[in-house]
Structure formats: C-alpha cells, structure tokens
Image (spheres, rainbow, N blue to C red):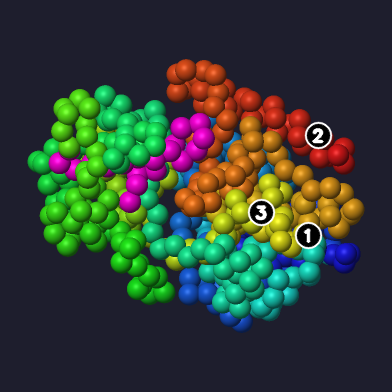
Amino acid sequence: MKARVTVVGGGLAGVEAAWQCARLAVPVELYEMRPAKLTPAHKTGALAELVCSNSFKSAEEGTAPALLKEEMRCLGSLTLEAAASSRVPAGGALAVDRGRFAEAVTAALEAEDVVDLTRAEVKELPLPPSVVATGPLTSVPLAEELAAALGHENLFFFDALAPIVSAESIDRDKTFEASRYDKGEGAYINCPLAADEYRAFVRALAAAATAPLRDFERGLFFEGCLPLEELARRGEDALRFGPMKPVGLVDPRTGARPYAVVQLRAEDVGGTMFGVVGFQTRLKRPEQRRIFRMIPALARAEFLRYGAAHRNTYICSPLALEATTEMRSKPGVFVAGQLTGVEGYMESAATGMVAGLNAARLCRGEAAVFPPPETAVGALLRYVTTAPPATFAPMNVNFGLFPPPAARSRRKRHAEVVARARRAFAAWLAKVGEGS
C-alpha cells in the first residue's frame, strides 16, 4: 500500500476527496486533465468548474438539501467554504459566482503542502488507496478501464430520466393499484385519464418548451428510450401505444379499461417515492410541473426529482460499491461523485468527502467508515448501494431517502427526520474522531 492517496478528477467530488486527505495530513496526488484536455462541457482548467447551474439548491432550514450542507460543514467542506466567499443573491438557495467559486477552490488546494496537483489525463485505474471522481464525462480510456473492472453491464450510459414524485402528493382517490393482467401483486399506482384529459395532455406536451441540448448531447436519443414529448409529436395516439397504454388494466371503480393511464412505481422500500414510468423527458422544469399536473391524480404532485436528458456515465453502484464507496472488485479504490449515481453538486461533493476520508484512513491503517442511514450523507450512500440494480438511476437528496419517521403530518415528519439526522451524525462523527 503506497503512502499517499491518488485522486483522479478535479470536480466537486475530487476536490472534496483531496481536501479530506489534506485535513488528515495525508499526502495526496490530485490529477486533473484540464486544461490540456477539455471535456465537451468544461471551458477552463479551474478546479470545481460549474458547467450547469450555479445553484447549490436550498439553504432553508428544515429542507433535505440544507441538512446535507449542514453535515458537509461538520466534515469541513471546502466547496461550502468557497461558496460562502463567492455567494450571490438567490433567495432561499445557495448560489455562487462561478468564476470566483472555482478560483477559491483552486487556490485553496494549490496552497496545501500535502497536495500535489498534476495536470494530466489518467487512462488507467490508479493503485490503492485512490479515489476515482471523473464525473459523467469521464474520458473514454478510463471509462473503458472502469467497464473492464466492473463488467461492461455495470457501466451505464443514459440520455433521459423520468421524474419522481412524493407518495404523499398523489391523490389516491383518483388512482387504483394493479399490475398489468393482474400479474403478481398490485405493484403500480395507476392514474387513469379520460379521452378529453388525455388529448389535452398530448397537445400540451407537443407544444411544450424543452431544455436545449448542447452540441455534444445531440444524437443521444435511442428509439426505445425517447423523451415523452418526442413521442407526443409523432401523433395523438403514440403515447396510448407507448408508456400510457391501458392494455391489461381494469379500473375497479368503473369495471372498464381506462382510455389512457400513467403508471407510478415505487422507488424505495418504504414507498415514499414514486417514479413516473416511461416519462423520461427533457421538458423545462416549469413545463414539467404545469403539464404533468394535468394528470388528475398528480394535480398537486411534489417533484422529488425532475426528468432530465443529458449524457450521463455512472456505474451500477448497488452491484459495484460498498457503502464506504469502495469498489468490491478493486479493494482500496473508492468511487465518488456522479459516477456513483448521485445527482447534484452537493450530493457529488458529499460522496467525495466520504471517499477521500476513507482513502486517507486506509493510508493510515484505519478502517473505512460511512454515516448511518438516518443522516443525509448516509441516506444517499444507502440509496446508491442498495437500490434495485435493474432500475437504478441518479438521485438527489430528498426526505424520501431517509428511514420513515413516526410523525404523521408532513411538517412534523420533516422536523423529526432533521432532528434524528443531527443526533445520528453527531454520534457518528464523535466515533470517527475517536478513530473507531
């Protein structure tokens, strides 16, 4: 085992991994291929360059994103420290000046004596202890190395994602539970639409505004996984013969087959989150809220994740990773960031912190650790390492990932989750500090 940690990738996850090593005085070699080799999305050689939004989501007390940030601050987050110095007005959200943020992160790591920043492309998996945090635009040689190490079936390339809604926001009076042709248990919540409701929905979809694709994202759509709005433009009945087909379903309230149906499938064991089956989309978020709420049962839907279309590379973490983010097939090699199947800036950074902490602990001869599932970081790690492999898809932090609380009202449930998470995280952090 070498006496220093190798971190590959200078995005949010990679810089947090390197920072964790530096905080523990463990030497780290941080590799970033930019600016010598740019990705199709990045424009500079700065570390932690933000290529999408400049928002780190909600900073409002009592929200899941705010709880995640709170835990990250307890671990000494570099990105949140840089965000505080480059913050711009954004209401209840934490948003930053992109340039100043990246400059602050880069300067902090360049000033660390134990951090060596190497500008070079890494084409092979590094020796342990190491962290791979190369993101959704991982270069082809390293992606091929990952595929070979994990089995090609464990490296996914997706172009479109469907939205996820909270269970409590579904109007159950306008649904029925059933599987097609009554096969097995009634695994789906079915949201029926009458003919006029369906036609209005299709017209709205066909005319909706979509998020523009960048040049490197064009041509990614596959016939078997087309965005919903693309199908709607092919004709009025296209969706009724596709994801909204009512075949094999009978509404017990009417005794008849619906004209069209939207199926919702549970995303977690506790049944707190439901994915909208077949509704992969690149609609803009306001359009998703407006149009998907035209479905009677989803009139008040709360979106835990919006649909999206973009190139995304991530491994099937439930098959590939331990909860510590360590690769099962490559002991001592940890994976962090969007490669693990988390979605979002802070989520990626948080996994980088755990991966870096564990790589540093391994270097020091200590056991790898991970926060309990009652915490925000722990809930994310539990999702990416225990979700059903066949339907595994990227996920943001949200209250649906946490073990269900006892309280009944939504406000009290969220408050209970936050209070429980704080207690659990403090206890875990105390144990980690003691070296256990």
Front one among 48 and 224: 224
Label 1 to label 3: alpha-carbon separation? 11 Å
Q: Which residue shows up at 53% across the image and 46% down it?
A: 388
Whether residue 43 is situated above or below residue 295 in the rendered picture: below
Q: Counting other residues with Cα less than 10 Å from the Cα at mark 1, is it few (<14), some (14-19), or many (20 or more)? A: many
Q: Tell me the number on the disc at residue 383.
A: none
Q: Position of residue 92 (x, y in %)?
A: 47, 39
Check whether the beta carbons of the residues at disc 3 and disc 2 lie within 8 A of each other: no
The magenta segment is 258-278
Q: Position of residue 435 (x, y in %)?
A: 87, 41
Q: What is the residue that sits farthest to the left in this orientation?
A: 196
Q: Tell me the number on the disc at residue 321.
A: 3
Q: Which residue shows up at 80% across the image and 62% down it?
A: 129
Label 3 to label 2: alpha-carbon separation? 25 Å
Check whether the beta carbons of the residues at disc 2 and disc 1 lie within 8 A of each other: no
Q: What is the residue that sits farthest to the bottom in this orientation?
A: 36
**Amino acid at the residue labelled 2:** Ala
Q: Position of residue 338 (x, y in %)?
A: 56, 58
Front one among 428 and 89: 428
Callout 2: SS? helix
Check whether the beta carbons of the residues at disc 1 and disc 3 lie within 8 A of each other: no
- Left or right for 138, reference 273: right
Q: If you read the primary sequence from the N terminus, does the residue marked by circle 2 or circle 1 appear first?
A: 1
Q: Is residue 345 visible?
A: no
Front one among 211 and 148: 148
**Amino acid at the residue labelled 3:** Leu
User: Label 2, on which residue?
Assistant: 430
User: Label 1, on which residue?
Assistant: 332
**Is 268 a magenta residue?**
yes
On-image quarter of the N terminus: bottom right
Q: Which residue shows up at 84% across the image and 55% down it?
A: 362
Q: Position of residue 24 (x, y in %)?
A: 84, 52
